[in-house]
Image: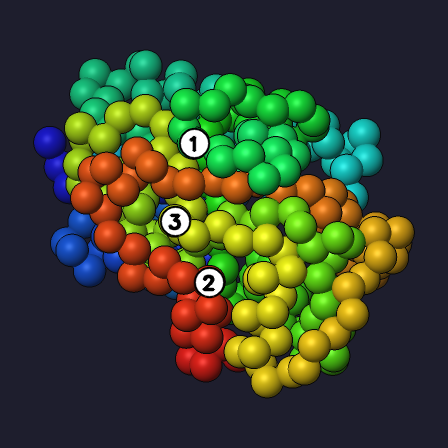
Amino acid sequence: MSNKVVLAGGRGFLGQALARVLAADGWEIVVLSRDPREDAPFREVLWNGETGGAWAAELEGAAALVNLAGRSINCVHTLEHSREIVDSRLKSVRALAKGWARAKNPPPVWVQCSATGFYGNAGDRFCEETLPPGPGFLAEVCRLWEDSFGPVLDRHTGPLRVLVGLARKFLGGAAGSGRQFMSWVHRDDAAAIFAAAVRRPELAGVYNACAPGPGTNAEFMRELRAAVNRPWCPPAPEFAVRLLAENLFHTDGNLVLHGQRCTPQRLLATGFRFRHPAVGEAIRDLTFREF
């Protein structure tokens, strides 16, 4: 068995963070990409995310396959976008499954991510790994794709960069009631979780890849304002959040107004230790270092 790890969707910020962590430990990284670059930091191989091809040979004898592929949910969920969100995930995982099944020596480890939207709009209910999927479009996408992954805090993309920009413009109030819970995970911890799954084949099943201290949207925004040295700001009414989300940020307001209170119980039971378990410290680490 080689030390090769194949990353589908490895061009994204999380895929690149994971690749750097694994490469530092001596793993060989192969990124499946729709547009492979010769000057990329890791070897890239062409694939279209839908069908078989020469890329499937990379699975032969590989140590692990990690699938992060899929169209971003950060968009207005029109019928067309919704279809793309579902299709990009199902087609990629089916193509990978066929390649895996045809390999004589397939990777013994397959790491598959999804989103905490699996649990639906769960209110203040604790969402552990044993819960069934909740209602709603994103929950159905996650059920089809599997399984549970909190929004990643990172400087380059994702919710933190947008929220920091708003807070610095004195628009860092809570969204709607502010009582909806936010599950999240620092970029470095997210990469470490996936790396642990690659290194430890015994970690099977569903794991919530999110920090152990989920808080409300109001609490998150309070910590964010403190990190960027901004005063209290009144909350944004729900109608305003939906209006701005769709027309200014071209995304779905439910991504902010709905929430999940997820806890990484199974992950903690394995002995995994978070470097950034508290939201305030995680935000400060990223804002002080990189914004």
Give neighbour class at mark 3: few <14, some 14-19, many 20+ (Cα, 10 Å): many
Tell me: 26 left or right of 55. Answer: left
Whole-angstrom CA distance, mark 1 to mark 3, is 11 Å
**Residue at the disc numbered 1:** 128
- Relative to 225, is 44 on the left or the right? left
- Determine the CA span between mark 3 and mark 2: 10 Å
Q: Helix, strand, or loop for circle 3?
A: loop
The amino acid marked with disc number 1 is Glu
Q: Identify the residue at the far bottom of this view.
A: 229
Query: Against 96, is 247 above or below?
Result: below
**Callout 2, which amino acid?**
Val
The disc, 2 or 1, on the residue closer to the chain's N-terminal end is 1
Residue at which label 3 appears: 212
Residue that appears at 32% across and 24% down: 205
Q: Which mark is residue 279?
A: 2
- Element at label 2: helix
Residue 6 can be seen in this image: no
Give the camera-side residue of 110 and 224: 224
Instruction: Please determine whether, in this image, residue 18 is positioned above or below residue 138.
Output: below
* Residue at (77% x, 64% y) in the render: 235
> Is disc 1 placed on a helix, strand or loop?
loop
Residue 236 placement, left or right of 4: right
Image location of residue 215, percent across then percent down? 53, 53
Q: Earlier in the sequence, mark 1 or mark 3?
A: 1
The image quadrant of residue 206 is top left
